[in-house]
């Protein structure tokens, strides 16, 4: 294992907060890995570009505070991955001022979010929002007024800019996702264990290849190293809901995998897209 410990930037997801990393930060502290826990909980009315710029300022301030200008690792969940990629590939894509060793996305919306599109779908949207109210979306929620969700739609300007920019060859990209291989409805009860998929033809399907909110097709992108969990079938059977999108940052298998990447740069993913 490598002895050097790089600072880790943590970026939470939509309607979440820095507290989602509580279990991970315990492990980081145990391994003497410094971390910077970015929060955009006060920026609910901002779009992904504005949040990405705020993240850039946050990292710059943290570097100045620590007088550290070497490589960092970035761990992000869901929408946080989208924001990080906009910073690294669109804002900083040509300058490459941000020195990043690993990008580790947990259930990231790398190709935009089918769920964001589903929220706005005139046919399916109302029923979906009703089924998720109080669980994944606020009650009396209007996606048309949510700049973050609008930016996450697969055909949004922000998504198009990320896809056009593509991965940077100076960063190691890793994607950690989960899959309902047991077809267990308890994995994500609102959708009977499945995940919605928005096809290239503009139609809707459901699949077990996802975490209830983000399907693999939304996360997988060429060049990224991928880990699909669970690796421990017995652990999944004892608590399938622990592998759904909302709880992935707290999942022990996810955290173990993250620490392997952070402490040993030679760690290989299960496969590359």
Image (cartoon, rainbow, N blue to C red):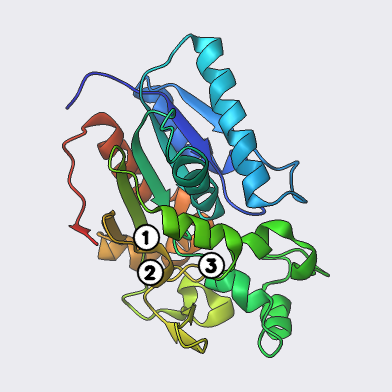
- Disc 2 is placed on an element classified as helix
- Residue extending furthest toward the top: 67
- Asked if the residues shown at circle 1 and circle 2 are in contact, with their CB atoms under 8 angstroms apart, the answer is yes
Residue at position x 48%, y 75% from top?
A: 186
- Residue 152, by quadrant, is bottom right
> What kind of element bears circle 1?
strand
Pick whichever, 167 or 257, lies toward us.
Answer: 167
Residue 6 appearing in the image: yes
User: What residue lies at 51% left-to-right and 56% top-to-bottom?
Assistant: 161
Quick one: label 1 or label 2, which is nearer the N terminus? 1
What label sits on residue 177 in the rendered view?
A: 1
Left or right: where 121 falls relative to 154? right
Residue located farthest toward the right when viewing the structure as drawn: 140
Q: Position of residue 241 (x, y in %)?
A: 47, 65
* Disc 3 packing (10 Å; few <14; some 14–19; many ≥20): many
Residue 212 against residue 230 in the figure, above or below = below
Q: Residue 16: in sight, yes or no?
A: no
Indicate the position of residue 140 as horizontal and vertical percent values: 83, 70
Residue 83 against residue 25 in the figure, above or below: below
Label 1 neighbourhood size at 10 Å, few (<14), some (14-19), many (20+)?
many
Mark 2 lies on residue: 216
Query: Is 126 situated left or right of 221 in this image?
Result: right
Mark 3 / mark 2, whichever is N-terminal: 3
Q: Estimate the spatial distance between the alpha carbons at disc 3 and disc 1, rounded to whole Å.
A: 14 Å
- Nearer to us: label 3 or label 2: 3
Callout 3: SS: loop
């Amino acid at each position: 294992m490598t002895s050097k410990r790089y600072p880790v930037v943590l970026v939470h997801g939509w309607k979440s907060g820095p507290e989602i990393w509580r279990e991970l930060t315990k492990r980081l502290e145990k391994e003497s890995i410094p971390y910077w826990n970015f929060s955009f909980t006060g920026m609910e009315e901002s779009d992904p570009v504005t949040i990405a710029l705020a993240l850039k300022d946050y990292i710059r301030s943290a570097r100045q505070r620590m007088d550290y200008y070497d490589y960092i690792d970035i761990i992000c969940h869901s929408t946080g991955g989208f924001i990080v990629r906009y910073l690294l590939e669109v804002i900083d894509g040509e300058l490459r001022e941000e020195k990043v060793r690993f990008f580790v996305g947990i259930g990231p919306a790398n190709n935009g979010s089918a769920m964001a599109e589903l929220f706005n779908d005139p046919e399916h949207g109302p029923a979906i929002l009703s089924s998720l109210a109080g669980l994944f979306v606020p009650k009396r929620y209007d996606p048309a007024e949510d700049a973050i969700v609008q930016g996450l739609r697969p055909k949004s300007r922000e998504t198009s800019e990320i896809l056009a920019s593509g991965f940077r060859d100076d960063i190691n990209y890793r994607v950690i996702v989960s899959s309902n291989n047991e077809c267990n409805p308890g994995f994500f009860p609102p959708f009977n264990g499945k995940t919605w998929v928005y096809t290239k033809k503009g139609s809707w399907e459901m699949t077990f290849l996802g975490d209830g909110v983000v399907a693999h097709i939304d996360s997988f992108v060429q060049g990224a190293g991928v880990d699909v969990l669970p690796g421990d079938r017995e652990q999944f059977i004892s608590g399938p809901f622990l592998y759904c999108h909302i709880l992935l940052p707290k999942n022990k298998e996810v955290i173990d995998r993250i620490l392997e990447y952070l402490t040993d740069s030679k760690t290989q993913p299960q496969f590359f897209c």
